Amino acid sequence: MQKLDSEKLFSVALVGRPNVGKSSLFNVLCKKRLALVKDLPGVTRDLRRGVAKWWGKEFSVVDTGGWTNAEDVISRAIREKLQSQLGSFDFLVFVCDARQGLTADDKNFFSIVRDTGKPFLVALNKVDSETTESMDEYEFYGLGVEDFYKISCEHKIGISDLVEEVFQHVKDFEIDLNDEDPESHISRDFPITVVGKPNVGKSSLVNRILKKEQQLVSSVAGTTTDTLSFEGQHGDLSFLIYDTAGVRRKTKLDGGLEGLTMIKALETIDKADFILLVLDGTEKPSRQEARMIERSSEQNKPFLIVVNKWDIAKEKDEWNKETYKKDLVKEFHFLKSFEFVFVSALTGSNIDKLFEKLQYLKEKMSKRITTGELNRFFDRAIKMTPAPFYNNKQVRLYYITQTKQKTPSFLCFANHPKGVTPAYRRFLENRIREEFDFNGVPVRVFFLPKDSSKRGHKFND
């Protein structure tokens, strides 16, 4: 029997107990809905193979059955098959459920995974934010692993970082930098999602943008109870705009209609390419609104802060743009840069400025830096601030290039990619943002082994 093409590639097996999200991760990595996903343990009972393509490099992904110590016939069969096949894979991704915490099955199976001697990583799935931690997550330090990869298959958070780690173990491959990356966020339809608290004027703003009365507008908070979409045109810019129900604090949700509308609003944020966060200019920005921005920034999506009702706010003596800007910077302190605009949906003031900002962000997201220009900058940056040491050895950075991803992303090749600290990664991202004017949009730098590039050279010998 002839081998499948996927079996000839570097193989990455997704392992773990039932219902932790292995099949969801399989689908995300392969960018296809190949695996059956259902919120029931034991759905996957056999191996499923697929091909993932990231940064022009293909690798095989294997979705395995859920490991459990139960003594029924199916559970025993899955255990026996997995134990006999674990050693045949090149890399193992041990998937856990961060919400449920560490279980006895996790501990038992992890000891078997570790004893294979194969390279592996631990992925904590169902983490809604890369920057927050729960008490349940601390339990996983009981596995004896220092680093975890916090991911959300549902919200596409942390997946690129996981793939970056996998590539540390792939020997002698060449990345095709001219190939379109599957993790491309910006579609031709230019979808925009409008989010914000109830009664900040989202629907009025959408109507003003579309130049028509598409929605019921009322002074009663919560008039919009579902996510609605409309097509629009402004000059040469064609767009699809989603208006969401107002997102309330969890403490105010009754578990019924409002709970459902919040879920739908957050799902629309996940699907959107650009986010308009609408604030009420007569009120100071809040932590609730900062959380919405965190949601989009964690998924590497650009956003524009739209301060509405400014015609009313500017009538107050203590309300001025400089004061409000300071409030924005204070509340959204976790952001390196962001764009904002003051408008009035009622009068139409500054709506053209809003579209100028959107066009600006769209152009930044598709901006390309030539390899020569990028590496001349890179040479200066790492000479001024060298990379850190790793295991008493200097981390040497060889080469950097921009990928085809629509979110500005860069691949940097190094002798010890694991030695690049999060602080140094942020340093390079910030320097790239400043040098090449990527203000207001996400910038990402990934580090891969030097063997991944056949044409790089060292800058800091």
Image (cartoon, rainbow, N blue to C red):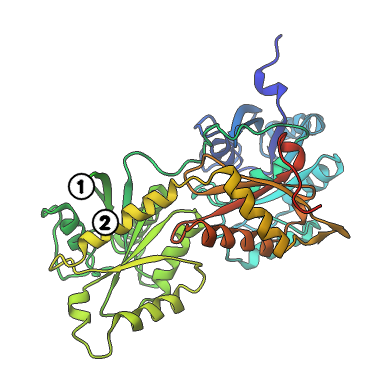
- Residue 335, position in %: x, y? 49, 68
> Looking at the image, is mark 1 or mark 2 earlier in the sequence?
1
Of residues 148 and 64, the one nearer the viewer is 148
- Residue 163, position in %: x, y? 64, 43
Q: Residue furthest top?
A: 1
Judged left or right of residue 290, residue 57 is: right
Of residues 259 and 324, the one nearer the viewer is 324
Q: CA distance from mark 1 to mark 2?
A: 9 Å
Circle 2 is placed at which residue position? 355
Q: Quadrant of the N terminus?
A: top right
Q: Residue furthest bottom?
A: 317
Note whether 35 is above or below 400 in the view shown: above
- Residue 416, position in %: x, y? 79, 50
Identified at 81% across, 29% down, the residue is 84
Question: Mark 1 and 2 residues: CB-CB less than 8 Å, in contact?
Answer: yes
Q: What residue type is disc 1 on?
A: Gly
Question: Element at badge 1?
Answer: loop
Q: What residue type is disc 2 on?
A: Phe
Of residues 266 and 53, the one nearer the viewer is 53
Judged left or right of residue 351, residue 424 is: right
Identified at 66% across, 45% down, the residue is 164
Question: Element at badge 2?
Answer: helix
Circle 1 is placed at which residue position? 235
